[in-house]
Image: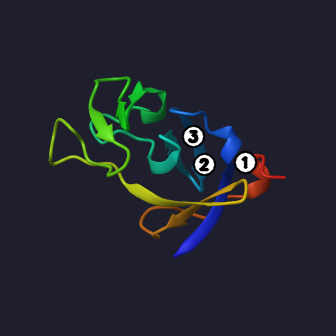
Amino acid sequence: MKTVAVARIDQIPDEGALVVNVGEEEVALFKCSGELHAVDNVCPHRGGPLAEGEFNDGIVSCPWHAWTFDVRSGLCTINPAARVRKFKVEVQGERVLLHLDGEGVGEEANPDDQGLD
């Protein structure tokens, strides 16, 4: 399992989201009640950008067709057969690290490209 630095904790707004690139993938980092959660930024319904949707109490709504997902579990709240891939997140000091499972996530992110100087 690879671990990559993708952001600084202060880059993620409280009760909001930040999109980071990991290889060719987009991952949405959400801060909910002080905890960080990371999911694939692509809605499985029609590919909408989840981080651009409304976010309340751990639930993000896809801005294209309003499918909703719990970022804590990755599960769709309206279609039990749908889910988004979830990634383990760790904070070390100010750095946000993603633990990658190797399933579909490409090369390591470059921390210099993510403002982690």
The numbered disc on residue 19 is 3
| Residue type at the position of mark 2 | Asn
Label located before the other in sequence (1 or 3): 3
The reply to whether the C-beta atoms of the residues labelled 2 and 3 are less than 8 Å apart is yes
Q: Secondary structure at mark 2?
A: strand
Residue 59 drawn at (x, y percent): 34, 35
Q: Can residue 73 be seen in this snapshot?
A: yes
Q: Position of residue 30 (x, y in %)?
A: 50, 41
Residue at figure coordinates x 30%, y 42% from the top left: 44
Residue furthest right in the image: 117
Which mark is on residue 21? Answer: 2
Q: What secondary structure is found at the residue carrying circle 3?
A: strand
The residue type indicated by label 1 comes to: Gln
Q: Nearer the viewer, residue 49 or 8?
A: 8
Asked if labels 3 and 1 touch by Cβ distance under 8 angstroms, the answer is: no
Amino acid type, residue under disc 3 in the picture: Val
Query: Which residue appears at 32% of the width and 52% of the height?
Result: 73
Q: Position of residue 67 (x, y in %)?
A: 26, 31
CB under 8 Å between callouts 2 and 1? no
Q: Residues within 10 Å of mark 1 (few under 14, many from 20)?
A: some
- Color theme of the render: rainbow
SS assignment at label 1: helix
Please indicate, yes or no, whether residue 108 appears anywhere in the rendered image: no
Instruction: Quadrant for residue 104, please give it.
Output: bottom left
Distance from disc 2 to disc 3, alpha carbons, whole Å, reads 7 Å
User: What's the residue at 40%, 55% (across, down)?
Assistant: 86
Residue 22 locus on image (x, y percent): 59, 55
Separation of marks 1 and 3 at Cα, in angstroms = 10 Å
User: Circle 1 is placed at which residue position?
Assistant: 114
Residue 29 vertical position relative to residue 55 in the rendered view, above or below: below
State the residue in front, 72 or 51.
72
